Image: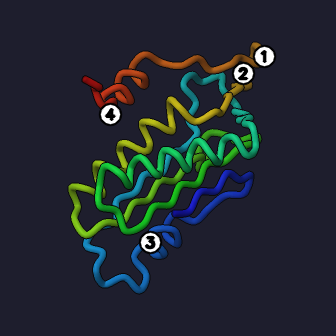
Amino acid sequence: MTVHVQREDFDPGAEIAALGAGRPDVGAVASFVGLVRAEKDDVSAMTLEHYPGMTERRIAAMEEEARRRWPLDGVTVIHRYGRLVPGDRIVFVGVASRHRAAAFAACEFLIDWLKTRAPFWKLEETTAGGRWVEAKDIDDARAGRWEIEKP
């Protein structure tokens, strides 16, 4: 497992290669790269804030849950913080498994939970000033698909 919360950019190709390097038993690597986008034309940048230590622990718990649900051979999660502009890479999720179904499902699960459960706060810079990004119902609904009902 690799979890990084960092200011620095990352190389998605290098991260994907590392997940399968020296692992002839790995049959699939699924990945997701999220980019900062301008929802509206007036967004010039986004600043992400987080609680160091707490953020890494929360993401590690998500990774542990993914490993509990699917047979995974490797997981890498990188999430950036600080000031980013549209087009910058913001998040990488990579999952290695023997089988594609597990890799795809775990990758989707992780990005859905990162979007809704990782303690990051996003402030958009606009021509009218700063505005905090609110949670979206659609993101909560996607993350809710992964909830396990308890008897």
Please tell me whether mark 4 sits on a helix, a strand or a loop.
Answer: loop
In the image, 43: left or right of 75? right
At label 3, the amino acid type is Leu
For mark 4, what is the residue? 146
In the image, 147: left or right of 41? left
For mark 1, what is the residue? 129
Callout 1–callout 2 Cβ contact below 8 Å: yes
At label 1, the amino acid type is Gly
Vertical side of 83 occupied by 121: above or below? above
Residue drawn at x 52%, y 72% is: 14
Mark with earlier residue (4, 3): 3
Could you say which quadrant of the image residue 95 lies in? Answer: bottom left
At label 4, the amino acid type is Trp
Viewer-proximal residue among 151 and 73: 151
Please tell me whether mark 2 sits on a helix, a strand or a loop.
Answer: strand
Question: Comparing marks 4 and 3, which lies closer to the viewer?
Answer: 4
Q: CA distance from mark 2 to mark 4?
A: 34 Å
Could you say which quadrant of the image residue 10 lies in? Answer: bottom right
Vertical side of 87 occupied by 49: above or below? above
Mark with earlier residue (2, 4): 2
For mark 3, what is the residue? 19
For mark 2, what is the residue? 126
